[in-house]
Image (cartoon, coloured by chain):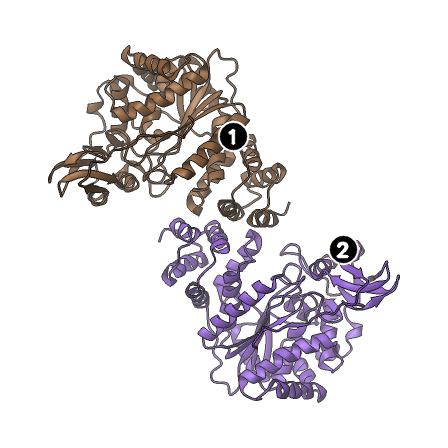
Chain colours: A purple, B brown
Amino acid sequence: MIPAELIKQKRNGHLLTKSELKQFIQGYVDSSIPDYQMAALLMAIYFQGMEPDEINSLVEVMIESGDRMDFTHLDKFVADKHSTGGVGDTVSLILGPLMAAANLAIPMLSGRSLGHTGGTLDKLESIPGFNVHLSLPEFSRIVEDIGICMIGQTEDICPADRKMYALRDVSGTIESIPLICGSIMSKKIAEGIQGLVLDVKFGTGAFMKDMEKAIELGNLLKAVGEGFGVKTDIVHSSMNQPLGQYAGIWCEVEEALSCLKGHGPTDTMAVTLELGARMLLQSGSVSSMEEGNTNLVSLIQNGSALSSFYDMVEAQGGNPIKCESPETLNRPQYETMINATRPGIIKSMDTYQIGLATVELGSGRKRSDDVVDPTSGIEFYAKIGDEVQVGSPIFRCFNSDKAKLEQASAILHRSVQIGSQPVSHQLFYTIKGE
Amino acid sequence: MIPAELIKQKRNGHLLTKSELKQFIQGYVDSSIPDYQMAALLMAIYFQGMEPDEINSLVEVMIESGDRMDFTHLDKFVADKHSTGGVGDTVSLILGPLMAAANLAIPMLSGRSLGHTGGTLDKLESIPGFNVHLSLPEFSRIVEDIGICMIGQTEDICPADRKMYALRDVSGTIESIPLICGSIMSKKIAEGIQGLVLDVKFGTGAFMKDMEKAIELGNLLKAVGEGFGVKTDIVHSSMNQPLGQYAGIWCEVEEALSCLKGHGPTDTMAVTLELGARMLLQSGSVSSMEEGNTNLVSLIQNGSALSSFYDMVEAQGGNPIKCESPETLNRPQYETMINATRPGIIKSMDTYQIGLATVELGSGRKRSDDVVDPTSGIEFYAKIGDEVQVGSPIFRCFNSDKAKLEQASAILHRSVQIGSQPVSHQLFYTIKGE
């Protein structure tokens, strides 16, 4: 295989065989194919796309680049969830422990803040002592013992994805449906799961702003998952406004704790229960979404879900007692209010800009070596459809770096449109016939 | 400027400003922007193209990355030619000295074998002692003294092009009209020329196989050249069959010497005179193509052109006396004949495959560190429209590596189609209205 010829083949719109993809990607992992050839291939894939067979081969090759976990010896349904990235989306922190309480096993590999979106690992690390860098055997043992463990991608799982993802981030090739699909599905399938629910976001704060693209991605993810024998369900939830009452680092952990105690915001709980009930349906332990919902609500009400969260914190080196008084941890030094400058009804929110404001505050990274500020975040006082007067609070933003606070606040001032007509916000997009 | 954002901008079809291109390309030259980001940008340009303004900026930025020569103190018209690459195209070796004999100054920066096409520098280096690595002051001095000097691209001229071209070659981004245009025109304009004739090839052995693309490239090259104040003419000559009687290394030098002595093949001489007469017209020394042609033919007949070639050889460290008996130099150890296997009329030649056969023989490179075999080449006994019998010779190929000779011969066997109808070959494509 001559790498430049293979790049030209894709550039000219021809299909790549599994053997060709394997040689190229294996060569990239072992560094015999340099970054620049992979970057050129990724851009050619961005423009020419990939056929379903090629995407399956891509996923297979990426899985085969590393280890594949195996939980078949467990007497539990093994499942996971994934979201395509959001602002204020703390669902993983709630759903993981909740599903463990429902007797599922959840081996969750999570990510860090990316672009304007938050990262589960960054939030978890704001819990004192919490360790997201475990070996695969430690990870497996915790999943087996308590049903949930949340770590970052290791060297052993999909090293091809790890290396390709870092390159896509700096070469302008993130927004490619086949590459997104390859990256998500290879990691998830390598976890050895039987079920998967995917929250493919749409709206102003989603990577796929366009509903058509979000549906296309959802269909593809489902087809790939099922091709690999994984029960796969797609939920499309809105990023036309942030999810929940907070977006940031520690404030999202606090929010997740409120949810696990039964005091969560309606939208965050609705997304969590929608994903969770689908997972229960996949496992066969319930026979309807309603039954799934009821079961999950009672696992929150009876404290099992919260206790499962504390078990996870303890197993991963954190101190659950500290989580019991979250208001004493990660206190911001500065805060500022953003108020309405005209009366009316909130017409739209630019969730992408709000996400950029969280990055500015310190909840995300502009460069891969930036350190996040665990005290940083935004509280939402008003959402789409809410009536406001001049001076009504819309955002409170906070962190421990005054200059960054001012920059974020300037972004937030521009992120909300106030109109005069009543409007409503649709949390889920349901595809006809489902 | 965030490099990944600029890549995305081009990827999404937006224009890049001169300042953006300058920052990106300067960053690439000084290595603050890595190969992988440039490779991604080049592939995005391949797909999205560039507007005329962007191409002008690209050419300007590439020129500004290095030195620009100046021959304005000379009392001569300073000009150059460029071909987009061919098989058996030895025109530069003839035209350079011929134009010097016509009292023009020709500061010619040439290239090496690329893909399936031959390289002027490789041919020149088969002349014992000939040095193509001169400093710019030495180069200028020889141009001033004898009117012609032919060297390779130096570190000082268009370093951006040098680095980008090497990357394009291995990243599948050669075949992009704006990038081809940027690469050619930046180097030529940096030579400080007043006139330029470009042979934009078409046909089976051209980089632009498609006539429409060749015309598009020609128009663009002309517009860019004239935008920079360089008189620019385009000739479209055919690569539907190799040019002349030979393709290879030393055999092409021998062929050039025959041409300079007045015994050249008709097609090679026709292309040489077409380009040369246009250059004379640009210089104002003649008032018609006919007058230009006549002048050039007499400069060959009276020995001035040949003597100009010998002057160049001597000035660049070679021994002109050795060139006087070319049949004693660079003798191949092996040769083999490829004969017709059916009777009929040669219908078509796959010049790309014939070019690959020259590479296989050793006249080109598969990897940038391959060493060429100066003895290697192919002699053409029949061309399109010629009648052949079973056993009639079509090719003689020769080199000093038996295994390679066999591989090349296998390629050549498949490169000719014999039919039964009379056909003709059109050497030039003339655009209507010209």
Confirm or deny contact between disc 1 and disc 2 (CB under 8 A): no
Q: Residue B210, image x and y in percent?
A: 38, 40
Parent chain of label 2: A
Q: For the C terminus of chain B, give its image quadrant.
A: top left
Of A252 and A391, which appears nearest the observer? A391
Chain letter of disc 1 in the image: B
Picture coordinates of residue A23, whole percent (x, y): 38, 59
Left or right relative to A267: residue B163: left
Image point (72%, 60%), residue name: A350
Distance in Å between CA atoms under marks 1 and 2: 43 Å
- Dot 1: element: helix
Q: Where is A240 relative to B402, above or below? A: below
Would you call the spot at circle 2 few (<14 residues within 10 Å), some (14-19), or many (20 or more)? some
User: Mark 1 highlights which residue?
Assistant: B224
Q: Which residue lies most toward the left here? A: B390
- As drawn, is B30 to the left or to the right of A423? left
Regarding residue B167, the answer to whether it shows in the image is yes
Q: Nearer the viewer, residue A237 or A378?
A: A237
